[in-house]
Each structure stands twice: as structure tokens, then as C-alpha cells.
Image (spheres, coloured by chain):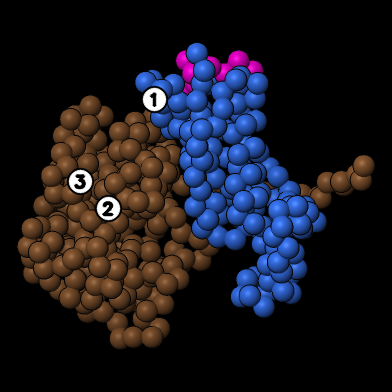
Chain colours: A blue, B brown
Amino acid sequence: MSDANNLTYESVQIGDALGPAEVYLSKDQVRAYAKACGMWTPRFTDDEGARKEGLPGMITPGNMSLAILSKLVTDWVAASGARIVRMGTTYRQPVMPDHTLTLQGFVTHKNESDRTAEMDIWIESDEGDRLVIGTATVHFPR
Amino acid sequence: MSTTLDLHSHSEASEDSRAPLEAYLNWLKLRRAERPVDGVVLTEHRQFNKDADYRALEDRFGLLVLKASEVETDYGHVLVFGVTDEMTRRFDFANVHLPAQEVIDEVARMGGVAIPCHPGRPNVGLCEHYAKKPALENVVAVEVLNGGSRKGEDERSVELAQARGYRTIGGSDSHLVSLIGLCATRFEAAINTIDDLVRELRSGDYAPVDFRPRRKPVPHAVPVEVKQA
């Protein structure tokens, strides 16, 4: 297990965990995000309006889920000087606000030639369903 | 001697996965205690790579790697084991509307076996199609444990298998390295080749196995008060 306070390419090991971290996402936080991003549409702001679109209630914008997942990675990177160079996500189920989400990830492989580490990352619902899954690439400077 | 195989996985050859096979095998080696599988079957979406040779990786990690395909039909997604040249000439694997009954019958005639996967999943699973169309004939087995299933999907798959008398398999359907081997199928016989696998799927003794960790429910958290500046 690598030391989070002194993370280097050499110290990172395959199997190292990111999180798990629990985040409570409120409807007000989602509305604030939607407003700030110019996404003020019913699906992100209003349960009744979202249901009229066939959704189970107001949902979290995909960009917000991506941002939450990126924080899992940046918290792991901390002040090491490493940086995210790529993230990719697949949205499997809507992320519903007013629920506790669990963020988790694992380092899965490393690439010596460009000093990067690849990791799986995902958001789990409070019932254990993986709502958003993805991968990230982190580069470590020499 | 029994053999446990993850019968459903996607490597970076599938457009929606970035998982290299080598990383899958390394992960299984690291997690051997909690996911005791003997190998994986790569079931890439809508394709079959006849020429891929994984023997060096098999030797390096001591795990079996077999090749199959996941095709898309008018009854949802289907895993095809024992793919031959005759099959890839007969069917365009890239076609997302393949006729399921023909796939099942022709694959069997050509020496393989076609198994519907995640039947409980909306849109791409057998259950939803059975609600609107006649049931398929000659189905040998269905996948009832799928590592990517959402709540209720595997349960629907089990109900379908029980109602129709289908045999059952499991696979991780992994698109991420760390999810490989979470669901698998345990065969009572030894399996070393794709021919062994097809023979056992048709008439052997097997059952799905679930290596997913039991998770404690997360308590509903209390919203954090956000103070206005």
C-alpha cells in the first residue's frame, strides 16, 4: 500500500485503493450545480418535472458525477504533484440526489514508459449498485 | 478436477472497455484468495479475433484464456462459444439485429453453443422480449449471475431459467480490471480448450458461482448544512 502523504510513481502499487469515501449529495447541491453550469432544466432541478420526462425523479448531471469522481482521484493524488491526464466514465443508472453515494477505486496497472498509473473508479448507490463506472490515468512527474 | 471460469468479460478490444487482458490476469492473480477462478473467456462485443494468441500470457499467469463473442440479436445479447470460420461467414457479428433463433440453431449445428446473457436486463435481455414474442427454442442455458446486473435483474433471470428449465451460468461481464472474476461458472470437469468448454456447456455439470463481497448497507446520511457566505 502506498503512503498517501508521499505518493510517487514508485510507491504506487497495483491494488492500491482509492477511498472508499461516502458523499451525501443533496437536491440543493445538484440544483446549485445545474444553475452554475447553465443546465437549469427540470430533470436536474425538480422531481415532478423530471418524472414528466420519464425519470424516477430529479437526477444528477453527468458532469457533476464526473466531477465527484475526479475528486476521489485528486484526494488520492493530494499534494504529490501527480495530475489526472484522462478520465472516462460510463453512466449505467441515474445518480439520484438525497442519497449517500460511495466513491471507490483501485489502481489496476502502471506504465513505466510514461510514468502513469491506471485506475478503476466508480460511484455506488446506498444499495450497492454501481451507478457510474470509469477509469482514470494519473501521471507522476520525475 | 473442477474448473471455474469467468465466462463473460470484455478487454480493450471492445469499444467500451479499457481493460488490457494482462491487467485482468494480474488482478486475478492478486485476488486469487477471494476470486478463485482458473481462467477467463473474452467475449468481445460483436467481434471474434480468430488470430489472437494468448498462450504467453496464459503461461505467465497460470490461467486459461479462451475466446468467444457477445453478439446482439432480436432477443437481446447472446454469448457465442466455440466460434468457427463457418459461423463468422454465416453471420455478420457486427450486425446488431441478428436473428436469435437462427443464431442458436446454426451455432449448435456448427459445433458451438449460444447462450443468452443478462436476460433480466431491460432492452437487451430475453425476459423483456419473451413478454412480446414467442419463446426461443433449443436454448441450452442462460446467464443468471452477471457482475454488471442492477437490482432485480439477476432475480428475473433466475425466475426465467426456473420457469423454462434452462441451465444457468455466471460471468462478471467485466469492463473494468478490478471487476474481473466476481461472477463465474464452476464446472465439475476439467476444461483446457474451447472444445472442452462447449462440450461441458452442452451436457456437463455446472453452476454459477458468486464471488462478490457481501456489502453492508450504507446508512442514510444527514445532509450537511451549507452556510451562506
What is the magenta range? A5-14
Q: Which residue is mark 2?
A: B43
Left or right, B130 with respect to B63, comes to: right
Tag 3 subunit:
B
Q: Is residue B17 above or below residue A81?
A: below
Q: Which mark is residue A111?
A: 1
Say if labels 3 and 1 share a chain.
Answer: no
Mark 2 or 1: in front is 1
Amino acid type, mark 1: Asn
Q: Residue at x 50, y 25 (%)?
A: A139
Tag 2 subunit:
B
Q: Position of residue A32 (x, y in %)?
A: 78, 54
Whether the residues at callouts 2 and 1 have beta carbons within 8 Å, the answer is: no
**Closer to the camera, A38 or B110?**
A38
Q: Position of residue B182 (x, y in %)?
A: 41, 46
Whether the residues at callouts 3 and 1 have beta carbons within 8 Å, the answer is: no
Q: Residue at x 45, y 26 (%)?
A: A116
Q: Which mark is residue B179?
A: none
Disc 2 crowd rating (10 Å Cα; few below 14, some 14-19, many 20+) is: many
Marks 3 and 2, how far apart at CA = 9 Å
Say if labels 3 and 2 share a chain.
Answer: yes
Q: Is residue B52 above or below residue A81?
A: below
Q: Which residue is mark 3?
A: B66
Q: Residue at x 38, y 70 (%)?
A: B125
Q: Does residue A12 show up magenta in the picture?
A: yes
Q: Residue at x 48, y 41 (%)?
A: A135
Mark 3 or 1: in front is 1
Amino acid type, mark 2: Thr
Q: Is residue B160 visible?
A: no
Quarter residue A115 falls in: top left
Query: What element does badge 2 sit on?
Result: strand
Query: What element does badge 1 sit on?
Result: strand
